[in-house]
Image (spheres, helix red, strand yellow):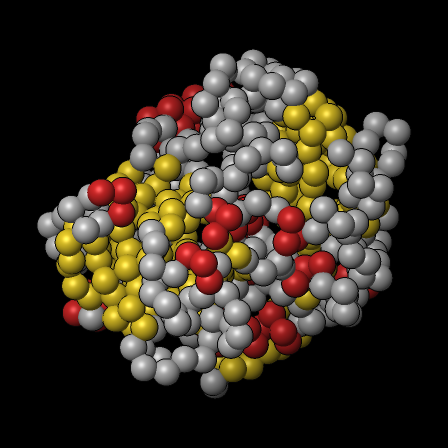
């Protein structure tokens, strides 16, 4: 069964990439079509995309102290800034850096504007796609730090909070409620190699690094955190948090925090599709195009995972009405939400499963590859309408939305210079011992080299998200 139409946001052109981190001759690419939107909306969207494209956005350099948030400037939450100090001798020879003193009872540093409904990329409430696509920060920890890889396992979490412009649930009526995002909360967790102790390490994170989304279980999220919105342009808050068990005071040095526009190694067309289909209708096919926008030939690998549960909009409404993240969890678990790798397959023109067969996709410079993303819909995926109660409130909800995230990357693209010091766990989406939700095929790990732990944290690859409403 093939859909007659797609709904997607207009995507901005990908910047060309060459050798290494993107320096080199620009590549050629086919122009993107705008047939999915009415002409007026297409013109407005493309105009906003062009207006939003820019160079890096410096978030914090600590040269004037540890910044505090105001209505016109982003900074660290007062609690964090009170537990931080400006010191001399920053990364890359800069004058100053920030040292944060974190404890088991105050283990997070939040970075945002004084007004919640502000995007970090623009400093305004205007969402502008086509700007940043990566986050860069310099970090230093000392010998014996909780953030050095080993036992006991500690990690630094870089967690993101995103806002859909116009969503008044986020922040509540006065902008200070517990609804911190538009049901778009991503998690990137990592540790540093023990040999990195005492040295500055530049950590570069593309959206591939964000392997989890709040209350989407066994799902490698990446762009799935934000769905039809671009990841970094929709970012309104960062949280730096020490994970795991530790005692005493942990010193973490930070410097040169910025959003970047990095060259992409690949791009999907479409990048987002919202569909409706009968859960009993069998396989649902979505044609996809994988593009190589760079100036050299490349071979790509792909990772796919899916989450089944309540729709994002319904969960966001629960979040806004309850002002309680635990209510979201109660609803998603109450309908039997879950995820894994057994609900979608990427197939080539011959119908072969690209991932299961470890078939790298070879695309010449400026070229493209066409395939089919097959969603294996089954009647049992759609659940019964249930009444879920939490803390004296009740909601009716149903397991009726299948969200799939597709990530493509070039395994031959060299990582950032310091990324060899950065270690991150894989997603539990392809965990070997995992019972999948109703309707998913039995869980089978992808071949070696194609697993969640193989996706580079810093490479800006290709991303596709589909959200399918499951009808009777």
Work out whether 248 lies above or below 176.
below
Question: Looking at the figure, which quarter contains the N terminus?
Answer: top right
At horizontal 70% and vertical 51% (from top left) the residue drawn is 451
Q: Quadrant of residue 204?
A: top left
| Depth check, front residue: 432 or 100 | 100
Give the x, y percent position of residue 421.
47, 52
| Depth check, front residue: 123 or 416 | 416
Q: Quadrant of residue 246?
A: bottom left
Give the x, y percent position of residue 172.
32, 64
- Horizontal placement of 167 versus 123: left or right? right
Is residue 321 visible in this depiction of the protein? no
Give the x, y percent position of residue 120.
30, 46
Work out whether 358 lies above or below 350.
below
Question: Looking at the figure, which quarter contains the C terminus?
Answer: bottom right
At horizontal 76% and vertical 64% (from top left) the residue drawn is 432
- Horizontal placement of 224 versus 251: left or right? right
Is residue 335 visible in this depiction of the protein? yes
At horizontal 77% and vertical 61% (from top left) the residue drawn is 381
């Amino acid at each position: 069964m093939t859909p007659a139409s797609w709904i997607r946001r207009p995507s901005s052109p990908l910047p060309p990439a060459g050798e290494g981190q993107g320096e080199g001759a620009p590549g050629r690419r086919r122009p993107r079509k705008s047939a999915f939107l009415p002409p007026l909306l297409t013109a407005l969207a493309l105009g906003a995309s062009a207006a939003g494209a820019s160079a890096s956005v410096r978030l914090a350099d600590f040269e004037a102290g540890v910044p505090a948030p105001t209505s016109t400037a982003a900074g660290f939450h007062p609690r964090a800034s009170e537990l931080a100090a400006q010191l001399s001798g920053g990364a890359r020879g800069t004058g100053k850096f920030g040292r944060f003193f974190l404890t088991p009872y105050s283990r997070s540093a939040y970075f945002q504007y004084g007004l919640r409904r502000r995007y970090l990329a623009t400093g305004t409430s205007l969402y502008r796609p086509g700007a940043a696509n990566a986050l860069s920060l310099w970090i230093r920890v000392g010998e014996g730090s909780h953030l050095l890889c080993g036992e006991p396992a500690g990690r630094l979490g870089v967690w993101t909070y995103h806002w859909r412009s116009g969503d008044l649930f986020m922040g509540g009526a006065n902008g200070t409620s517990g609804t911190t995002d538009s049901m778009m909360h991503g998690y990137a967790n990592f540790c540093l190699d023990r040999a990195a102790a005492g040295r500055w390490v530049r950590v570069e994170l593309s959206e591939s690094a964000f392997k989890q989304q709040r209350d989407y279980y066994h799902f490698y999220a990446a762009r799935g955190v934000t769905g039809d919105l671009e990841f970094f342009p929709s970012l309104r808050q960062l949280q730096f948090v020490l994970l795991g068990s530790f005692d005493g005071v942990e010193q973490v040095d930070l410097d040169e925090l910025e959003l970047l526009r990095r060259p992409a190694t690949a791009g999907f067309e479409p990048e987002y599709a919202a569909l409706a289909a009968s859960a009993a209708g069998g396989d649902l096919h979505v044609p996809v195009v994988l593009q190589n926008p760079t100036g050299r030939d490349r071979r790509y690998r792909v990772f796919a995972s899916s989450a089944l549960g309540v729709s994002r909009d319904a969960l966001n409404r629960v979040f806004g009405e309850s002002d309680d993240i635990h209510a979201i969890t109660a609803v998603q678990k109450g309908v039997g939400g879950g995820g894994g790798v057994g609900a979608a397959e990427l197939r080539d023109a011959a119908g072969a499963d690209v991932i299961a067969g470890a078939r790298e996709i070879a695309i010449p410079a400026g070229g493209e590859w066409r395939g089919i993303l097959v969603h294996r819909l089954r009647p049992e995926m759609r659940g019964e309408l249930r009444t879920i109660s939490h803390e004296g409130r009740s909601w009716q909800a149903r397991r009726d939305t299948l969200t799939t995230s597709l990530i493509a990357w070039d395994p031959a693209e060299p990582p950032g210079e310091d990324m060899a010091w950065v270690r991150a766990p894989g997603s539990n989406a392809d965990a070997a011992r995992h019972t999948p939700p109703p309707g998913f095929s039995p869980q089978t790990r992808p071949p070696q080299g194609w697993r969640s732990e193989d996706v580079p944290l810093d490479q800006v690859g290709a991303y596709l998200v589909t959200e399918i409403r499951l009808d009777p």
